[in-house]
Every structure is written in structure tokens, then in C-alpha cells.
Image (cartoon, helix red, strand yellow):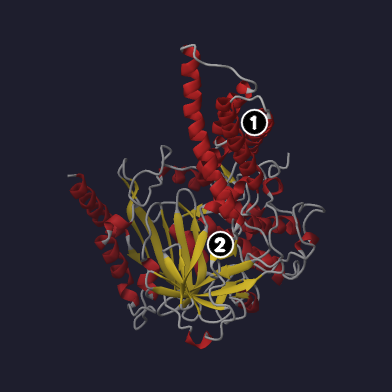
Amino acid sequence: MKQVIKPLIGTVCALSVLMTGVTVFAEENKTTPSGIAYGDIGNAIENWAQDNPGDYSSFVTAVFDGDGIIYQGAFGYADKENNIAATTDSVYEWGSITKLTVWVSIMQLYEQGRIDLNEDIRTYLPEGFLKNLKYDDPVTMLNLMNHNAGWGEGTWALQTADPEQIVSLGEVLSQTEPPQIYRPGEVCSYSNWGAALAGYVVECITGQSFADYVHENIFGVLGMEHTSILPDHSDNAWVQEKRKELVSYTFDGSVWNPNGHQLIYINIYPAGGATGTIEDLALFAQSFVREDDPLFKKPGTRELLLSPSLCLGDTEFVVNCHGLWADEYENASVIGHSGGTNACSSDLKFDVESGLGVVYMTAGGWPAVPSIIFGELASYDLSSYGGSITAPGALKGTYAGCRSNRHGIYKVMGLFSMLPLTYNGNNEYSVSNMATLTQISDNMLIFEQDGNSYPAYVYKTSDGTTIVSLGSQSFASENSLKVSLYLLILMAIIAVAGIFMLFYRVISIFTKKHISYEGSLFVAFSQICRVASLLPLILLATKYSEQYGLTHTQGYIVFAIEAVCFAVFAISFILSGRGLIKKDTESFLRLKYALSVIGNGISIATILSLELLNIWGV
């Protein structure tokens, strides 16, 4: 019955809001890159929404070109439980589309001669602000735009569910600075922290908060009256109240968590804090294709912003245009940015050549609007890039996503992004049995997944690390993660075994069959600690999705647990080792000592391999 009712409800939801779609204007004889007449764009989107009610809970969307908004519509329910339909006045979170306000701000300052894109950003920051730089090389604003300043994501929480923990941009950046892993310019590794740092540079240059600057120089100029950017939306009372109507749903239509509204406060707000209506987002997106763009005084500034700033290796494949990511569809080459928060997903894309673009925001689902406008994602023709291959099969091994900083407890998150490359012969590799990589020259590869093919580039960094880059996503050779994973699995098995051993010990004590021996108390204590030592890893895994890391309080608790456990493991290891080598130790005790040595040794090795004792900086 449930399987029948759910699609029926979805269909009713879609039909009930189809009338919210509005075609603002439609020019005759104009068509989208996919071949749809402007006047039929609304029908195409509404038909998709009606035919695919199970693919979304709610979404709002708009199609625009340089002359204005062509179509905007809202579909589904912002709050199913309370029967609140999504409308074009509903507010959604932009997520990482917010970063485009940073890059626009930077280009405005560039136009005014107040910043040099190739100057070391330390010129504009307070002295000594960056403390975790590994390299002396300059970090430029262009590095931040291209996400190749050397940072991945950090360990400390970048957002919070507690409004009392909202702090200033400069303070949160100083508290959460991740280690620099790569030499600037060598590896493209998407960094929320780096984009937020660019927003702080705007503060340092202008003397205004980033929020005030954006309201004055972007939102106000474009007439965006229904958009906020501060973490708690306090810069726009209308948005702050309206946001309470939106419930976040998972892709299967269920409420995300007990706090369905998912009011999470993004402290590094320039990287993802904007929230507002679809019309406001469309006005912002449209500014990129307007000939009379009011955000810049010189036409050359916008042209520079939209020009390629990063290509895939030494190829002609464009990866980034000063902070905007490039995508290839069947009928158009587009640039833009997607976004995702705990509550919402979003997308902004436009074709520079035709000036046609699309935006959408959703609280559960993945609307196919870009494909309706531009066609399906394109498969690349890489036949002209073939060449000799010096060492066939040399790329096999384990790779990890470069966004993980691969240090300390955060290494655990890298375990979830590991990609084992298995060599199949004929220059083809299997990628976790989910995709294939075909090497066609020493540097070029074809990445194929779900019927689509994309260019990939392989190279070595200055320290000899092999990088496989898919553009905005890069993966680094990382065999040590395998060792960490095996040790972690062994540690978990030993912890589970320790529970049974402790249970047996308690039963023995109650039945008065327990025989104490030298060091037995510490052995028992170490078994308890082996269970406790897994708690920090569980804490990280559960809190990561909520706040992108641990708060400092959580970090200190983790450090304390790990420090105590490590000390107990070390003492128990020594005592058990001493008992093991004693000549008069009885055989049944020798077995207990041996098991204790093995268990404590693996626990010590796991902690050291994950660097839990040095990541917290305490």
C-alpha cells in the first residue's frame, strides 16, 4: 500500500504547484542549446516535474538570458507535513554558489586597482595570520580562485547548530586553518576554507565586514531584497523568518533528521552562507551574461572573470574561470557553480556564447533542469591526445581524495574517499569497480562512468606524489592509508574481542573463579580503553556530516581520550611484555600476556599511524 500511496502523493504534489511556474517573457524564434523554443521552456520543465515526482521533494528554478528572466517556477512542498507548498517566494540555501559573491567582490576590487590577483595574499592579511603554511611560495588570489593554494578541508568544525557559537569570519578562519599539503599551484583541491579566506581578504582591504560589502556592492546594486548571507540570516529579517518554513528532505523523501529544518549556521559564510528566493538568485546569475552588467564599471573586468584561469594540465580543457567551474554539455560549454548544505542543493550554470543560463535550488532531489536546457552531459573526444605510454600499468595502487588533509584523525575521512586502481591490461584500470580509466598517453587518460567519458590528467608533484586529476577533483597516491585502514580494522576487531574478555572477567569475578596475576588490572583497563579509543573516530564520522569537523571542545575531549588510552596501552604493553619474557611465567599466563602485547601493540600503532596525538595542536 505504501508503495502505491507515495508515488500518488508525489504526483498530486507536482500537479498542485504546476501553476506556480511563470513565463516572464519569451522571445520568438529563439531556442535553447537543446532545441527548445523559449516559449516552451516552462512546459518542458513542468512536464519533467509532473513525470518525475519521485525525484524531488521541492525545488525552485529559473531560466534567464542577458535580457531578463525567461521562466521561473516552484514545485513540490517546502513542508509536506504541514502542507506548505513551495513557491517562488520560498527561500533556499545557495550553498557554494555563495562563493561567486567572493569572486565578484575580488574582481570589483581588482577593477579599482586595490588588489593584484598575482600578489601574495599575505600582503593584504594581518601579519602572521597564516600559521600552517608548509611552503614559502606565494599564495595568490588566483590560487584561491583556482582552488590550488595547497589546502584541502580541515579538521575543525566550519559550521554549528548552536547560534551561540557563531563567531566573526577572521576568528573562525584563524581557529580552523588547515595544514597546507601541496605547493601552491600544483594540485587543484576544492577548499571551502580557501574561498572563505578570500572573503576575509575583502574585509581586510575594504574595512567592511564581507556581509556589509556584498549587500552594498552586489545585492543592493542588483535589487536582491530577499537574500541574506550571514550565518544566522540576521542581515535580512524577511529571509530569517521565511527560512523557518523550509524542511530538508533526503533523496527518498524522508525528513533529513529530527531537526527537519536543518538550521545550521555556516561560520565561514562567504563559502556557503547565502539564502534567498529563486528570483534573487536569478538576478545575480543574470548579471554574468548582461551586456550592461552593473556590478562592473569596465566590460573587460567581466570578460576577465569569465575567461579560463586553469586548464587540465597542459591541455586545452578548461577547468576553472576565476572561480567558476566549466562543464561540457551536448549542446553547450557552460560555466558556473553548484552548491550543497545540510539542507539544500543548488546549481547555477550559463552558456557564455548564447547568454542563456539556469539556476535551481532544492531541499531534496536533483532536478534535471540543466539537461533540459543544455542537453545531456557531453562525452569527450580524446582521440587526438593519444601517444606513447612509457610504463603500462604503473598507475595501479591506492589513491585518496586530495580534499582530505591526510593528517591526523582526519585521515579517517580519507579512508572513505580511497580509490583503488586495478590494472586490467591494455592500458585500462578499474576504479573501485565503479568506473574505468584508460591511459592513452603518459599524461592523458579517459575516465568513463555511466556511459559518459571525461578527460583526466596524471602527473607528479615536486615531492613525487602521483596525482590523477579530473579537473575540480584530484586524487593522490596514498599507500599509507591502506596500512592505516588495516590497523583500524584490526583495532576494531580487538576492541570487540575485548568486550567479550571483559564480560568473561566479570563472570569469573562473580563466580569467584577469577585468578589475579601480575599486571592483570592494567590488562583489563587496556581492554576498556581499546573500546573507548574508537569513540573519537565514531564522533568524527557522525559529526563530520553535520558540522564539517569537530568543535574545539570536542577536539580536546578526543585528545584527552586518546592520550589516556595511549598511556594505558603503553603501560600494559610493557607489563605484559615483561611477563611474557619471564622464565617462570606459567603457560596459560604466557598466552594472556601474548594476546595483551598483540592487542596493545596494534592499538599503539593505529594511534601513531593516524597521528591522533599531534593533529589537535594542544
Q: Please, what is the three-letter code of the amino acid marked with disc 1?
A: Leu
Please state if 314 lies on the left or on the right of 127 as rendered: left
Disc 1: CA contacts within 10 A as few (<14), some (14-19) or many (>=20): many
Q: Residue at x 55, y 64 (%)?
A: 397
Q: Secondary structure at mark 2?
A: strand
Amino acid of disc 2: Tyr
Which numbered circle lies on residue 103?
Answer: none
Residue furthest to the bottom: 384
Which comes before the other along the chain, label 1 or label 2? 2
Left or right, 233 with reference to 61: right
Q: Is there any visible trace of residue 353 in the rendered image? A: yes
**Image vertical order of residue 518 relative to residue 397, above or below:** above
Q: Pick the quarter of the image with the N terminus.
A: top left
Residue 18: give x, y in percent of width and height. 28, 59
Q: What percent of the width, then of the height, locates residue 420?
A: 50, 62
Instruction: Specify the quadrant that holds the C terminus.
Output: top right
Q: Is residue 484 above or below residue 522?
A: below
In the rendered picture of this protein, how many numbered marks are placed on residues?
A: 2
| Residue name at image x 60 percent, y 26 percent | 523
Residue in front for this viewpoint, 75 or 242 = 75
Mark 2 surroundings: few (<14), some (14-19) or many (≥20) residues within 10 A: many
Residue 87 percent location from the top left of the image: 36, 54
Residue under numbered circle 1: 580
Which residue in the rendered view is the most extreme toward the right? 127
Which label sits in the foreground, 1 or 2? 1
> For the residue labelled by badge 1, is the local secondary structure a helix, a strand or a loop?
helix
> In the image, residue 43 lies at what x, y percent?
28, 69
Task: Name the residue located 56 percent from the left edge and 29 percent from the top edge.
Answer: 592
- Of 326 and 62, the residue lying toward us: 326
The tag on residue 399 is 2
